[in-house]
Image (tube, rainbow, N blue to C red):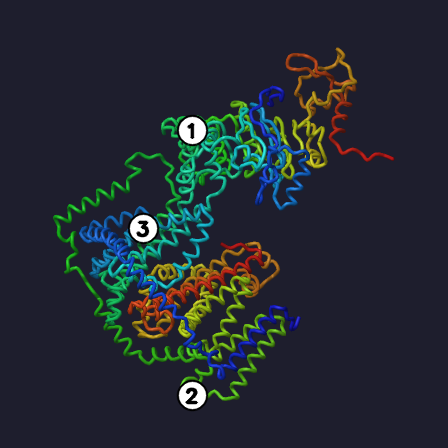
């Protein structure tokens, strides 16, 4: 049916009209292009004033907490540093063995030996001591909030948005208020990491407790359980697996935040080692130290995942006391044995210097050789991406196309040609009955021509708000408008556009490439088997570490940031695409096969449309991962909101930093809600239910 | 196999005018009435019109000591809700639940826990086993909650394990067992505290047909030993017929008819009940005493059969001899004469009446 407009389409045409009007008028009325400075609300100053007041009048309170928390950290740090390495290594290997078997134990041993040989033992133990304190705290806090949220709907409604904010506010922005309230030192890292890592525990606690089947609860009640018995003997043990998954996620979050927190320095831990060596351009050293973090993360991850998976295993045979507590007995006896041995043989107590080997210098030389010899190729890649992808998105075709970059001047003929081709495309799509696609093409064409930074803010705000309204209803539309409005009136709009541009390109590339790989992996078991360990590693790798290889080759700059974001954000795109395709209902596939669909038809007309909601959840995760990495990418020199946050952190400017942080959180939450809403809508339309 | 109904003289559990209404303000409909309303149908309609959901409407029945009382209904008929009201897993909106003559609804939480610990046992459709406990610990779980020592509760658990035939499975975990075995664990657990009243909520519905039949036999065998007062929920009419001493049929939250299976077959209260009874193989349900013919008189030459003999086995004799057979009770007393005419009359009562001819 050619050109069948619904009322919704007319809304969109109106939006495009307003956009064009804004573009036409922005020469006349400059406030359309750039939000006037005089109207910027000094929210940053207000926040600073409030903060100053709190520090002045309540500072003693927070410093007191800080002082109190200092002690356990010091104690654990002392113990971990004082224990002979052989004892620590033995204990960890035993835990790994108990959690998942001898393979993980071997991997743990390898990781520990690596730390020792490279010479980062003390730093690793310092990091570990922070994690060791923060994880139990986070689990306790998370479990308590989770239980509260489980029993009280009102509490849950209050807790959930808080978790959203805690998980989307960029990690650097977290550190700011904590730094100001609690003073410098390891405690900042601890508190930041507890705040960052308790939300997943809350979510898992609520999900786990909710997931206990009603009949199990009823049978507990009919067995005559008192309320406390029902909770501790029925609900909690029945949801143990989910709770342990929460422990795993909390531990990983805690580790990553501890590493990030080392940016404020003074901790002498492994994160600081990575940072300072990056700053000194000692890439060999930073890569070696980064490997320590990666190994540590992987070991901790596998151990906690192993424990969660084991929680459902039971040995059916009746056992004696010694058999039941075998692991504990082995651990205690072994540790004691190694401790005594270490007192006699000094090498088991402290790893001898002579056994340390550092290939850092060789790596640095090799890198220098490579960079020097392949300079032209590296530059070419960088230029290509910059001129043809990044610049057009940033400042639009009108700015990006020049003899220097594209090799020709943008003449009036070109412009008219572009406009004609794009309207033609949109018109054709509309004629074919795909009015939505036509509208998308038009908006895309306008944005690409003028660039994200060249778009008038009222137009973009309107487009986003209407999109939110169409996808998620009135509340989402209004929320979008309010959120973006906040960004406008606080004067951080230009930087927000720079963040969106960089993250947007990265997400787009990650999603397309990741989905392609995911589709391939869904149809080919070998590919799937190859991709999986890569994904696992990329996902457990602390964000810092991912930056290192790209900085090594491409130096500081937006391109490096782009690559790092892609490397991290591609993982969920791959995973969800594969999962979505592999978990399609078999009957549909069989039906399509019997109808006689070719492989290609099967993929594009059956599988992809059905798997699309899951893939959209993948897009959602891709965006969230992209934003998380974007924050860290501020370290390698970007210009968006993340950079303001980072500068705010280093200058101690609370107001500016936190506003930029909130700005990023707003963008993250809006995109999250939109993609979720879209996915849910599609799922309902298709009658599928995907977790 | 079945114990005659009138042996249960004492009422164990009684359900009087029980209502369960969901909605914003369910109590408003029952202020001071104790659930006793003049016209239940009208009242439910009024409640539904006020945007509330009626799960149970004016349900009343008695369960006698040692009796298997079956509640049969299709999904959404309120049968699961009523059994939960009886055990107060669901709080009734109005009405009375009398256990040994005492109103359960007036008990405090602590008293209720005590009653559940000692007087009630319940079996669930999807078993409701604790996934983190092995078989013996699952069965001993109610005892553990009471604070019984480990040795004692394992000894008791062993006894019920033997009763349900799960010996040798003590250390398995629920996920290692088949559905039938899991339900045996559920049954054993509900019996571990030696309850007086035994609730079974569609206990065999999740099982395969063959296993289901086995489990029904098993259940009847256990009941023969223990003589519990049982409320058994099912959506399967055949199952109800097989095991019920008396049964209630529910529809839209209300009880349509209560009686012995044979009463329902011979005198269905309405078309809804008749739809269930229609396909019942009557020759396997009807017994000699159900087809007594008042007009026939006893003569010496007639054959004599014991009360409870299935009609199926009598058919050849009834076909051969118009004057029928004499039915006698356990003590040798004569109950009456069963004839082909009596059989026809009994069947006619259970059939849809022919349209009146004008």
Please tell me the numbered disc located at residue B157. 1
Helix, strand or loop at label 1? It is helix
Please say if A380 is above or below A321. Answer: below
Residue A502 visible in the shown view: no
| Residue designated by label 3 | A137
List the residue tagged with mark 2: A403
Decide: few, some or many residues near mark 2? Use Cα within 10 Å; few <14, some 14-19, many ≥20: few
B9 to the left or right of B110: right
Residue at 54 percent of width and 28 percent of height = B103
Would you say residue A606 is visible in this rendering? Answer: yes
Query: Going from the N terminus, do you reach mark 2 or mark 3 first?
Result: 3
Chain hosting mark 2: A
What chain does mark 3 sit on? A
Which residue: 31% across, 49% down?
A136
Quarter containing the N terminus of chain A:
bottom right
Q: Position of residue A646 (x, y in %)?
A: 32, 68
């Amino acid at each position: 049916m050619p050109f069948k407009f619904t009322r919704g389409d007319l809304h969109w045409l109106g939006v495009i009209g307003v956009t064009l009007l804004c573009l036409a008028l922005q020469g006349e009325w400059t406030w359309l292009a750039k939000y006037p400075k005089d109207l910027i609300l000094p929210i940053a100053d207000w926040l600073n004033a409030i903060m100053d007041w709190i520090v002045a009048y309540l500072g003693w309170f927070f410093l007191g907490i800080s002082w109190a928390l200092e002690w356990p950290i010091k104690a654990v740090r002392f113990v971990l540093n004082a224990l002979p390495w052989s004892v620590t290594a033995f204990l960890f290997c035993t835990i790994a063995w108990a959690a998942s078997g001898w393979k993980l134990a071997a991997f743990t041993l390898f990781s520990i030996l690596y730390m020792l040989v490279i010479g980062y033992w003390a730093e690793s133990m310092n990091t570990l001591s922070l994690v060791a304190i923060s994880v139990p705290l986070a689990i306790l806090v998370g479990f308590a909030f989770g239980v509260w949220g489980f029993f009280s709907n009102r509490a849950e409604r209050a807790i959930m948005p808080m978790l959203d904010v805690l998980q989307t506010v960029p990690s650097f922005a977290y550190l700011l208020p904590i730094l100001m309230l609690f003073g410098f030192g390891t405690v900042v890292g601890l508190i930041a990491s507890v705040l960052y890592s308790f939300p997943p525990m809350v979510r898992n606690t609520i999900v786990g407790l909710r997931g206990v089947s009603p009949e199990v609860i009823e049978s507990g009640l009919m067995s005559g359980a008192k309320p406390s018995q029902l909770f501790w003997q029925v609900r909690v043990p029945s949801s143990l697996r989910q709770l342990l998954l929460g422990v795993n996620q909390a531990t990983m979050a805690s580790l990553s935040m501890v590493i990030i927190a080392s940016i404020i320095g003074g901790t002498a831990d492994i994160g600081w080692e990575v940072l300072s060596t990056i700053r000194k351009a000692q890439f060999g050293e930073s890569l070696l130290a980064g490997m320590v973090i990666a190994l540590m993360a992987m070991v901790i991850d596998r151990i906690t995942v192993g424990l969660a998976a084991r929680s459902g295993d039971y040995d059916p045979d009746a056992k004696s006391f010694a058999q039941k507590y075998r692991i504990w007995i082995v651990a205690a006896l072994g540790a004691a044995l190694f401790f005594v041995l270490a007192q006699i043989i000094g090498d088991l107590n402290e790893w001898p210097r002579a056994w340390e080997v550092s290939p850092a210098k060789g790596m640095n030389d090799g890198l220098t050789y490579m960079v020097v010899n392949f300079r032209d190729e590296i530059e070419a890649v960088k230029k290509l991406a910059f001129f043809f992808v990044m610049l057009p998105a940033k400042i639009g075709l009108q700015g990006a196309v020049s003899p220097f970059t594209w090799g020709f001047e943008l003449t009036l003929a070109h412009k008219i040609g572009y406009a004609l081709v794009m309207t033609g495309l949109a018109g054709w799509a509309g004629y074919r009955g795909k009015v939505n696609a036509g509208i998308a093409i038009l908006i895309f064409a306008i944005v690409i021509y003028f660039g994200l930074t060249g778009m008038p803010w009222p137009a973009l705000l309107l487009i986003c708000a209407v999109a939110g309204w169409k996808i998620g209803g009135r509340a989402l539309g209004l929320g979008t408008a309010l959120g973006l409005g906040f960004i406008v009136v606080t004067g951080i709009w230009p930087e927000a556009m720079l963040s969106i541009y960089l993250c947007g390109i990265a997400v787009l590339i990650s999603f397309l490439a990741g989905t392609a790989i995911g589709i391939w992996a869904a149809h080919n078991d070998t590919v799937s088997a190859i991709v999986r360990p890569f994904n696992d590693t990329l996902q457990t790798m602390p964000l810092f570490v991912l930056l290192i290889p790209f900085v090594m080759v491409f130096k500081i700059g937006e391109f490096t940031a782009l690559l790092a974001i892609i490397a991290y954000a591609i993982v969920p795109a791959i995973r969800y695409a594969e999962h979505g395709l592999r978990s399609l209902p078999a009957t549909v596939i069989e039906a399509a096969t019997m109808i006689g669909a070719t492989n290609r038809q099967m993929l594009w007309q059956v599988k992809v449309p059905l798997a699309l909601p899951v893939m959209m959840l993948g897009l959602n995760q891709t965006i969230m991962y992209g934003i998380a990495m974007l924050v860290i990418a501020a370290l390698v020199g970007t210009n968006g909101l993340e950079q303001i946050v980072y500068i705010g952190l280093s200058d101690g400017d609370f107001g500016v930093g936190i506003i930029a942080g909130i700005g990023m959180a707003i963008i993250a939450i809006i995109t999250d809600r939109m993609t979720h809403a879209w996915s849910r809508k599609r799922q309902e339309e298709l009658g599928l239910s995907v977790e | 196999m079945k114990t005659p109904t009138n042996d249960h003289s004492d009422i164990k559990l009684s359900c009087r005018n029980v209502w369960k209404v969901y909605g914003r303000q369910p109590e408003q409909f029952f202020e001071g009435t104790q659930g006793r309303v003049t016209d239940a149908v009208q009242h439910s309609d009024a409640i539904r019109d006020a945007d509330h959901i009626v799960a149970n409407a004016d349900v009343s029945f008695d369960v006698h000591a040692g009796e298997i009382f079956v509640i049969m209904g299709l999904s959404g008929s309120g049968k699961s809700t009523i059994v939960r009201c009886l055990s107060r897993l669901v709080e009734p909106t109005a009405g009375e639940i009398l256990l040994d003559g005492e109103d359960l609804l007036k008990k405090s939480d602590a008293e209720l826990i005590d009653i559940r610990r000692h007087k009630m046992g319940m079996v669930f459709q999807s078993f409701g086993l604790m996934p983190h406990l092995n078989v013996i610990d699952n069965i001993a779980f109610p005892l553990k909650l009471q604070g019984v020592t480990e040795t004692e509760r394992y000894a008791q658990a062993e006894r019920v394990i033997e009763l349900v035939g799960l010996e040798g499975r003590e250390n398995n975990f629920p996920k290692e067992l088949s559905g039938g075995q899991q339900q045996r664990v559920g049954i054993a657990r509900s019996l571990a505290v030696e309850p007086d009243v035994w609730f079974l909520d569609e206990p065999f519905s999740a099982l395969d047909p063959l296993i289901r039949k086995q489990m029904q036999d098993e259940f009847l065998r256990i009941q023969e030993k223990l003589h519990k007062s049982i409320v058994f929920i099912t959506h399967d009419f055949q199952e109800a017929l097989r095991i019920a001493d008396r049964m209630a049929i529910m529809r839209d939250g209300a009880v349509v008819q209560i009686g012995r299976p044979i009463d329902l077959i011979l005198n269905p209260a309405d078309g809804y009940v008749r739809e269930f009874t229609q396909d019942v193989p009557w020759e396997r349900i009807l017994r000699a005493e159900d087809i007594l013919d008042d007009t026939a008189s006893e003569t010496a030459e007639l054959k004599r059969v014991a009360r409870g003999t299935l009609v199926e086995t009598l058919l050849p004799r009834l076909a051969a001899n118009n004057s029928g057979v004499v039915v006698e009770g356990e003590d040798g007393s004569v109950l009456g004469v069963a004839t082909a005419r009596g059989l026809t009359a009994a069947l006619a009562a259970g059939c849809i009446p022919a349209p009146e001819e004008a």
